[in-house]
Image (cartoon, rainbow, N blue to C red):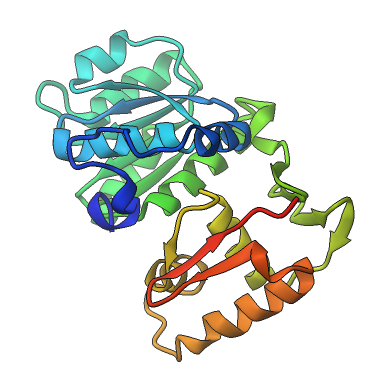
Amino acid sequence: MYPAATLGGSIHPTGCKASVRPSLQRAAARHCGGVHLLVVEDDDAIAVPLTVGLERVGFSVTRVATGTAALAAVGAEVVLLDLGLPDIDGFEVCRQLRSRSDVPILMITARGEEVDRVVGLELGADDYIVKPFGFRELVARIRAVTRRSGATADVARPQQIGSLEIDRRTHRVRVAGSGVALTPKEFDLLTCLAVEPGVVVTRQELLNEVWDPHWYGPSRTIDVHVASLRKKLGDPRWVETVRGVGFRLGSVE
Ligand code: CA
């Protein structure tokens, strides 16, 4: 769960980006299209690693800690809005933002009750995510609201990793120009690994995000799907096993 576990070892607790490889950032920037996010969150322990993680997958991020600063900010293509802010209630910030702009608003909150979801959505929020949340789930939701709003065509552009092309919009995958027919689960598995190519995704993260968080079946299911995915991609190096931890997406030219 966010913030510590899913961002893994490559982010220093202070938010230092020293270990992030530039090539990875460039690759990620291509598939996130450099969408500009406004992160409204007063808690540094959440905002700092969140900002670093979002930048790492290619978003550009402005972070503010108050509702006043959020209302003064300009140019955001998606707003991630914490509800518990020190000055203005997040619901009020949402209402004011919505009264003057169609910018997609994704509410982030510790409050998970049904009534809050309804109020948030009625005030014009596009989606709602409850803490604690998985980083990949957040990225997927940002992509979804961005896609719906048409904020940028870049998000819909296929992601290219070596000779592998993934088109999330059409669910099409190609290797060296040839189409690969994947099952929905294989496609989800591949896109989950492709959020951060080269970075290890643990077996538990895959279970949580590709299967169901409450899935208690044999974890061998992952291995079966990975084996099938490798076979279809035509080279086992596409999905590397990190023994005892999980898997990462490799790159094959
Ligand atoms: Ca807060």
Task: Please name the residue shown 39% across and 41% down the image.
Answer: 121
Residue situated furthest right in the rendering: 178
Tell me where residue 210 appears, x and y as whole percent.
52, 68
- Nearest the eye: 216 or 228: 228
Tell me where residue 202 appears, x and y as whole percent.
40, 67
Task: Please name the residue shown 48% across and 38% down the image.
Answer: 57
- Nearest the eye: 148 or 139: 139
In the image, is 178 to the left or to the right of 190? right
- Location of residue 217 with respect to 69 vertically, above or below: below
Tell me where residue 238 appears, x and y as whole percent.
66, 62
- Location of residue 204 with respect to 81 vertically, above or below: below
- Nearest the eye: 67 or 43: 43
- Does the image show residue 184? yes
In the image, is 242 to the left or to the right of 128? right
Residue situated furthest left in the rendering: 86
Tell me where residue 156 appears, x and y as whole percent.
69, 37
- Does the image show residue 125? no
In the image, is 55 to the left or to the right of 222? left
Task: Please name the residue shown 60% across and 29% down the image.
Answer: 33
- Location of residue 27 with respect to 252 vertically, above or below: above
